[in-house]
Image: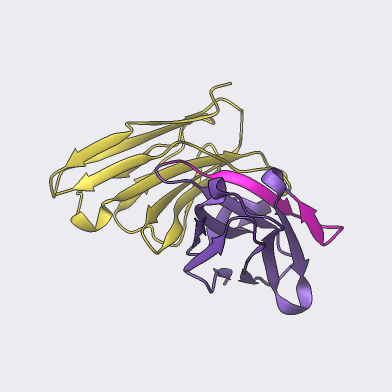
Amino acid sequence: NAGVTQTPKFQVLKTGQSMTLQCAQDMNHEYMSWYRQDPGMGLRLIHYSVGAGITDQGEVPNGYNVSRSTTEDFPLRLLSAAPSQTSVYFCASKAEGRSDTQYFGPGTRLTVL
Amino acid sequence: AQSVTQPDIHITVSEGASLELRCNYSYGATPYLFWYVQSPGQGLQLLLKYFSGDTLVQGIKGFEAEFKRSQSSFNLRKPSVHWSDAAEYFCAVGAGQAGTALIFGKGTTLSVSS
């Protein structure tokens, strides 16, 4: 199993540009989520999904869109990038049981100029 | 709303000394609690987790944590710190439906002096 994969690893955008951060998992997990990590702020939940076709907002959803058309994929879209979205983004997945472990991807480092 | 507080932003411990990292949570029901570690430039590694039962939880790399409901705490401990333990440590609580996602504390950076 590849686990949770994220692409790209690094990305530089200009203000106003759009892009999609890709996240995929091959563990057949129903639950997936996106976090951003900023210095001194820990990881903050952006959006999450409990299954294909079902998404919900986390702590910091503004400026981000998500969709979940398949169990495997959970892309995060930035429609109009802003410098405040410069961050490291982590995707995670877990099975449905509350005791199941959350598995994190390696992260995407995004810089918005 | 769920929240996690890690009161110490930065801690320095001598190599071989004991370590305790503090974590306090706010959660209405029985919390599911986690400790993760992140080395510089790396991803997150799960150290241990608590769901129920024994309040003292053993993890990897010699770490343990104790759940104290009366104090809303889940402190991480290690009896003897190694230089390789220098990293950032995050406490988290499971949130949402069946712990769909995690609410993290802001982290504690551990430095190890020789």
Q: Where residue B67 sits in the image (x, y, percent)?
A: 76, 66
Residue drawn where x is 62% and y is 69% of the image: B22
Image quadrant containing the N terminus of chain A: top right
Q: How many marks?
A: 0
Residue B4 lies in what quarter of the image?
bottom right
| For residue A107, side relative to residue A4 (left or right) | left
Q: Which chain gets the yellow colouring?
A: A
The residue closer to the viewer here, A54 or B43, is: B43
Q: Nearer the viewer, residue A10 or A13?
A: A10
Question: What shade does chain B have?
Answer: purple
- Toward the front, the furthest residue is B114
Is residue B93 left or right of B67 when viewed as pictured?
left
**Does A44 sit above or below residue B85?**
below
- For the question of whether residue B15 can be seen, the reply is yes
Boundaries of the magenta span = B42-58
Query: Which residue ends up furthest to the top in the rendered image?
Result: A1
Q: Is residue B75 part of the magenta span, yes or no? A: no
Left or right: where does residue A40 sit relative to residue A16?
right
